[in-house]
Amino acid sequence: MSYSSSTPSGSDEPETIPQQSRGVRLPFSRPIVTYVLLGAIILVFIADIVFQQLTGSPVVAYLGAQVNSWVGAGEYWRLLASVFLHAGLTHLAFNGWALYSLGRDIESFYTPLWFTAIYFISGLAGSIAWYVLGSDSPSVGASGAIFGLIGAEVAYFVRNRQLFGAFGRQRLGNLAVLIGINLVFGFTVPNINNYAHIGGLIAGFLLGLALAPSYTVEWSLYGSAPTGKLVDSRPQGLRVLIVLLALAVLLGLTLVGNQRWAG
């Protein structure tokens, strides 16, 4: 999965919003969690290589690959652990670069707390989509979570489309092309778990739409010049309830998957 960002990812300097809100600046957060997640998937991959050298055989399944019959037998931890595992160096590089490129922007937009919620819930949603609809073939990779980040970025610009104007429409167009290319790639190349991609994308978009800042511009006079300030009108308590609701929905879908695989 490839992604090219048009914003200064990871920058501490806020970005000027174009057109009708020119002069009003976005309140960006410093990305932190993105680098922690990137380090985690690299360390897990190194651990997998070391264990393979020690045992003489692949051990990715024992580290947490999602095998649906094993999940149905009670190993639910695999639904999340599989998000940190990768099937090879190319797979790791592909997802690692996508996380690095996407994550810094999304974390800046949503703050580290809500970025973390979007990433893990999207990753779980991708795993659960495979649990409900997929086969018993092992599945690993952060792609579901990464597709969730793409969905969350779409939601961010949809939520604030009036504020961003033509810039936002251009960004949404670029994201639509990115999603289309990657879904076609997933449907045409063997051994790609498109159930996880689509599950993560839907979860990331819906959760992002609910968690995205809903900005309004408040103007005030500073000396003789009007000064604009962006204000997020969405209550934090509502965001907490939305995350809990999303987890409840995933629990319900896991119970649906149990009808196929448990017992």
Image (spheres, rainbow, N blue to C red):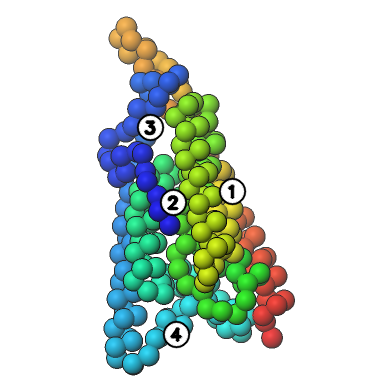
Q: Mark number for residue 26? A: 3
Would residue 214 be found to the left or right of residue 110 on screen? right
Q: Which residue is mark 2?
A: 115
- The vertical placement of 79 against 116, above or below, is below
Residue 158 place in picture, x, y as percent = 54, 36
- Residues at marks 2 and 4, CA–CA distance in whole angstroms: 29 Å
Q: Amino acid at mark 1?
A: Leu
Which comes before the other along the chain, label 2 or label 4?
Answer: 4
Residue sitting at x 56%, y 43%: 209
Residue on which the image places disc 1: 206
Decide if residue 205 is on the left or right side of residue 50: right
Task: Tell me residue 115's x, y (percent).
Answer: 44, 51
Q: Earlier in the sequence, mark 3 or mark 4?
A: 3
The 10 Å Cα crowd at callout 4, few under 14, some 14 to 19, many 20 or more, is few
In three-dimensional space, the C-alpha distance between marks 3 and 4, rounded to whole angstroms, equals 44 Å
Q: Residues within 10 Å of mark 2 (few under 14, many from 20)?
A: many
Foreground: 238 or 177? 177
Please say if the residues under marks 3 and 4 sit with CB atoms less than 8 Å apart: no
The answer to whether 6 appears left or right of 141 in the picture is left
Of all residues, the one furthest to the top in this rendering is 224
Element carrying mark 4? helix
